[in-house]
Image (tube, rainbow, N blue to C red):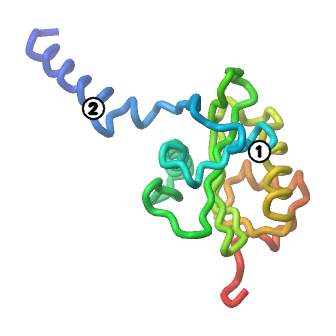
Amino acid sequence: MDPHELAERRRELETYWEGEGGFRERLLIEMVPLPTVSEQAVIDKRLIVGTEDPELRKVAEQFAGYFKRELRFDFVPFTADDFADGDEVLLINSRKVIMLSPVACGAVGFDRRENCLRWVWVHPFERGTGLMGHVWDILERRYGNEFWIETPVSPPMQKFLQSREVDMSRWGGPSPGH
């Protein structure tokens, strides 16, 4: 390889891997330690209320970005600075990563006005561990067991909901005037 080609490859790598919107940013899926979370924000060891804390909302926005990329949506389902009254965001505390402080491995977006689960994203390393079942139990205690589930619902989430015997009539959200 000639020196010119090598220099071009190095320049490409600088922007391809590390640059703004670069390849690394598009491939990396991180869990986030939360050393400043108070015990009052943690629900039953697994959910962390992040609605009122700008830093926690930014973490939730990061997970919303993973959700968007994985499901190939056109937009993120949650942004830290643009949310309405009644919107709640909860971070999911990892089961696999044990630290003194919680480690967020996913997030849940919920609309209290519509009583609707808007979105859920869980880190791939945490899937299949029973974590979502625990989270679901908490969601049902917090919001009741008849909340709506916004569609589209991913195939793995469909399987999960079916395993929990969640009535499919709840999928899609409330009808107008409901």
Location of residue 12 with respect to 148 vertically, above or below: above
Location of residue 104 with respect to 167 vertically, above or below: above
Badge 2 local density, few (<14 within 10 Å), some, or many (20+)? few
Q: Position of residue 118 (x, y in %)?
A: 64, 62
Q: Quadrant of residue 132?
A: top right
Give me the residue at 70% from left, 32% from top. Answer: 94
Q: Position of residue 45 (x, y in %)?
A: 78, 37
Q: Which residue position holds label 1?
A: 43
Q: Quadrant of residue 89?
A: bottom right
Q: Secondary structure at mark 2?
A: loop
Q: Secondary structure at mark 1?
A: strand
Badge 1 local density, few (<14 within 10 Å), some, or many (20+)? some
Separation of residues labelled 2 and 1 (CA atoms): 37 Å
The three-letter code of the residue at mark 1 reads Ile
- Tell which of 42 and 109 is nearer to you: 42
Q: Which residue position holds label 2?
A: 19
The three-letter code of the residue at mark 2 reads Gly
The count of marks equals 2
- Determine if residue 52 is in view: yes
